[in-house]
Image (spheres, helix red, strand yellow):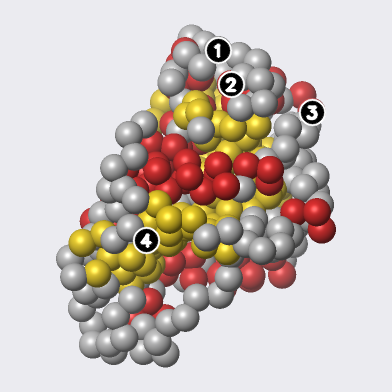
Amino acid sequence: MSIDRKVSITKISQSKLEATDLISPIFGKVYSDHMLRCDFKKGAWQDLKIIPYADISISPANSTLHYAATIFEGLKAYRNIHEEIVVFRLQDNAKRMMVSAARMCMPVVPESIFMTGISELLKVDENWITNHPGTSLYIRPFQIAMDPYLGIRPSDDYTFMIITGPVGAYYSQPLKVKIETNYARAVVGGTGFAKTGGNYAAALKPALEAQKKGYDQLIWTDAVSHEYIEESGTMNIMFIIKDILITAPIGDTILNGITRDSILTIAKDQGMEVEERPIAVSEIIQSIEQGNLQEVFGVGTAATVAPIKTIGYNGVDYELSDVESRKYSLGFLDTLDKIKSGVMEDKFGWIYKI
Ligand SMILES: *Cc1c(COP(=O)(O)O)cnc(C)c1O
């Protein structure tokens, strides 16, 4: 990859690595030694800077703080069986961030900055990535408005940053989810397809109410009729009914998940029948009652494949098949793990070597 931008590196004086548990760190609380920053000023992206991970300074009138002018990405780096550092589908995250930027009136981070930024940052902090099974380095690129201005308009200045943090072996507990029929996450014409802060802020209260009733997460339905399944808010949702893999189609209200796309690609490649179409809640309930719903699972970068064991709908909890016997979702998880670790050939071109 050609590096057409200058990257300056200022290293930390004392690494935090020795004091860090890389095998089972707390997700989202532990950060690697360095971060990347690239400012957008006077209409142009400036040089990339790798600097020690630290607080940043912003004006109290910063428009991100007031009006949620923020977008982000989430992806992972792994150390494969050949001891190489690899990132899963890096370019796809770069492209999706551009989609989010366009919706939020932000200057697009060029692919060269996104890719060079991650590559150079990972080289500096490569010792934070172990080959212990299941571990990875979570990468969080984000972009925020920087104008100290309380008027409502797109900002002139922006900052693009990347922070990273180790993620431990993820043993996802089978989830108990509630089909939400009151609140909505996204509307047609809205921002549901963008990874932008406001979507997640608005989902906190509905999620908290569901948690008080004993559910782990929500499955969102469409905002108009609440009759069609959308997604889970950090994961897309997949069903297996009569050996067919079914998931809701990408659109305004559903985030275009890269894990979703990866699993659809693997399933089709294995000759499985795949349907991307609207899924009525009534169809799901009916197929549970008829014994045709074989598997339900969430798919996203954080958990990869998260089995769903219980679905709550209209006050009734429906128990699904034992998660240990789920050949499809366990198979997808296994294939993805093998591609990332280098055990299986990367036939779809998903692995980016640093
Ligand atoms: C990030 C995200 C997903 C999952 O996307 P991946 O690219 O697979 O990580 C699904 N839904 C929402 C709302 C998300 O923010």
C-alpha span from label 2 to label 1: 6 Å
Q: Amino acid at mark 2?
A: Ile
Instruction: Give the tally of numbered discs.
Output: 4
Amino acid carrying mark 4 in the image: Cys
In the displayed structure, 114 sits above or below 8; it is above
Where disc 1 sits, the SS reads loop
Residue 285 falls left or right of residue 133: left
Q: Residue at x 58, y 21 (%)?
A: 339
Q: Position of residue 30 (x, y in %)?
A: 70, 60
The nearer-to-camera label among 3 and 1 is 1
- The amino acid on which the numbered mark 3 sits, given as a three-letter code, is Glu
Instruction: Using the image, determine if residue 114 lies above or below residue 339.
Output: below
Q: Nearer the viewer, residue 242 or 167?
A: 167
Left/right placement of residue 52 relative to residue 221 reads: right
Q: Say which element carries label 3.
A: helix
Instruction: Specify whether residue 340 is in view.
Output: yes
Residue labelled with disc 1: 345
Element assignment for label 4: strand
Q: Which mark is residue 324?
A: 3
Residues at marks 4 and 2, CA–CA distance in whole angstroms: 32 Å
Dot 4, how many residues are within 10 Å of its Cα: few (below 14), some (14-19), or many (20+)? many
**Amino acid type of the residue that numbered disc 1 sits on in the rendered structure:** Glu
Of the numbered discs 4 and 2, the one sitting upstream in the chain is 4
